[in-house]
Image (tube, rainbow, N blue to C red):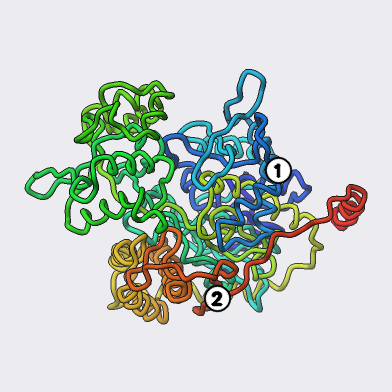
Amino acid sequence: MRPSPLFLAPHPLYRVDTVVLGSGCAGFNAADSLYDLGVRDLCLVTEGLSMGTSRNTGSDKQTYYKLTLSGGEEDSVRRMAQTLFQGGGVHGDIALCEAAGSARGFLKLCGLGVPFPTNAYGEYVGYKTDHDPARRATSAGPLTSKYMTEALERSVRSKPIPILDQAQAVELFAPEGRLEGLLCLDKQTGGLFCIQCRFLVLCTGGPAGIYGQSVYPASQLGGSGLAIAAGAAMENLDLWQYGLASLDFRWNVSGSYQQVLPRIFSIDDKGVEREFLLESLRPEEALLYAFQKGYQWPFDVRKRDLSSRIDLLVHEQTLLGREVYLDFRRNPSGYSFEGLPEEAKTYLANSGCVQETPFLRLQHMNPQAVALYLDHGIDLESQPLRVGVCAQHQNGGVAIDANWQSSVEGLYAAGEAAASFGVVRPGGSALNATQVGSLRAAEHIARRPRAPFADPAPLLEACGALERGLARAEGNQGLAWSQALERLRREMSLCCAHARDEERMAALLDWLNALLDKPFASLSLQPGQAAGYLRTLDLCTAAAAVLQASLFAAERFGSRGSCLYAAHPDEVPGMEGSLVRTQRGESRLVPVRPLPEPDDWFENVWRDYRARTQRS
């Protein structure tokens, strides 16, 4: 169902109480939850229902992180919150909310049909994942987030929730720090239109499009520039996850792809192969670190001389112009099952993976992982897999409070668009964040009082100003937007990924700031290409903020998480209680909010709950 505009001239204007922007796990859950909470005047806006990370990404067995729901191992909301908080640069109230809401969000997905496995007695058993002291992780297979998105979409479509598809959001209108609406480009007609609203939940994922070497699906571009341009405070923009991924089909090569110990080699332009790990590591080290990359997948500066040495050595080969491959057809040099490091040998033996080749071991351990590549035209039995160190997830984003509201009144963010993580995070916690954050935002919006809509004239004037800017950009002598985007992505991957060069970062930031100072004069636009042009401006805005935050963080924090700075290779001690907040081109340190100590006396909580929910 598509809503009807209020009027059509000078630009189509829609008026709706609450807009959900994005159609991934967070966006669909926000819309679904808002409707269930009684907010019926809402609309889901998306650039494309089939786009985004949630529907188009995964790993060998994509992880969902939640409170332990099986066995006798001790766990609690507080323990899970402590794990999230200890990742560094994480606000305590956000960590506690994500822990407290994890079971609720997970069980909703189970009820909607996401096939998370149980044992014969109905327990949702778990396993350990990255940075996880318990066994909180579970998985529905390589396509967990796809199943989540499809289940949540079915639930949304079962309700009369209007969906505006093929609508690219290009500007948030927030005069004086209060959201009043947004401007969109109709990708079918090429025309601009306005949506006047009281509340908006930003669920556009991370700014994936700023990197060239990326494991994000090509359809994931992000919308962080919208919030940055609207003046929203951002946090932890410097903090990302990077790791090994295949390049011809974008996919993490984590978990069993590494644990079956494929041969790793590089090849130059003359066709000469080298098992380059053995040029820097002893054979037993190469085998152990390669195996450990399965569950220590993200590059981690603390492991730069251990398992993350693999990432650095792969990156070295890339800089030399050599292509790097995982080869499941042959064992690495020096391989013998009996001679394996004890950790790898025990794991493979317990998994029944004693077959002769990496491919046979992978086929035994995880046939879905083999089938996935075959579905995309890559036969791991007969051909090697080209890989590189790629951007995978931003741990920062829009600064939020415990209701997932930003510093702009009425603007909320959920999923990867929100800054709910810091230096490191448990694997799979991002999927939990999509569900908890979108529900927290929906609950808060449902309780908010409603004021009359403002005069739409300023919103329509902003739309007219943008239209005039695009007209000035047509045929000017500036750099083509596509060339600017290509340069941005290439430079970001070279100087501001896991290995960071501050001098080149500063030069790139200067170029972006000059471009963004007069965008309609700096970049040229050809007729019919407004979508790409405006997307480039959004990505340049996001990249400039990432660079600014990263240069600031390099001096204050040094290297940490997945970020290794050439001029600041060591972490600065004693900074655990701070994080980087970036707003309007400036960064500063702010203290991390501590873990709350809430009152858990039932009668008091019951009374407060009634008072809080009766305000709706």
> Which amino acid lies under the numbered mark 2 shown in the image of this protein?
Gln
Residue 498 point in image, percent of width and height: 36, 60
Residue in the image at 86% along x and 56% along y: 612
Q: What is the secondary structure assignment of the residue under circle 1?
A: loop
Mark 2 surroundings within 10 Å by alpha-carbon count, few (fewer than 14), some (14 through 19), many (20 or more): some
Residue 230 lies in quadrant: bottom right
Residue 205 point in image, percent of width and height: 51, 54
Residue 452 point in image, percent of width and height: 78, 68
Q: Which residue is mark 2?
A: 583
Compared with 350, 536 (above or below) is below
Q: What is the secondary structure assignment of the residue under circle 2?
A: strand
Residue in the image at 60% along x and 61% along y: 90
State left or right for residue 337 relative to residue 349.
Answer: left
Q: In this rendered view, identify the residue nearer to me: 479 or 502.
A: 502
> Which amino acid lies under the numbered mark 1 shown in the image of this protein?
Ser
Residue 354 lies in quadrant: top left
Residue lying at the far left of the rendered structure: 270
Q: Which residue is mark 1?
A: 76
Question: On residue 372, which mark appears?
Answer: none
Residue 543 visible in the displayed image: yes
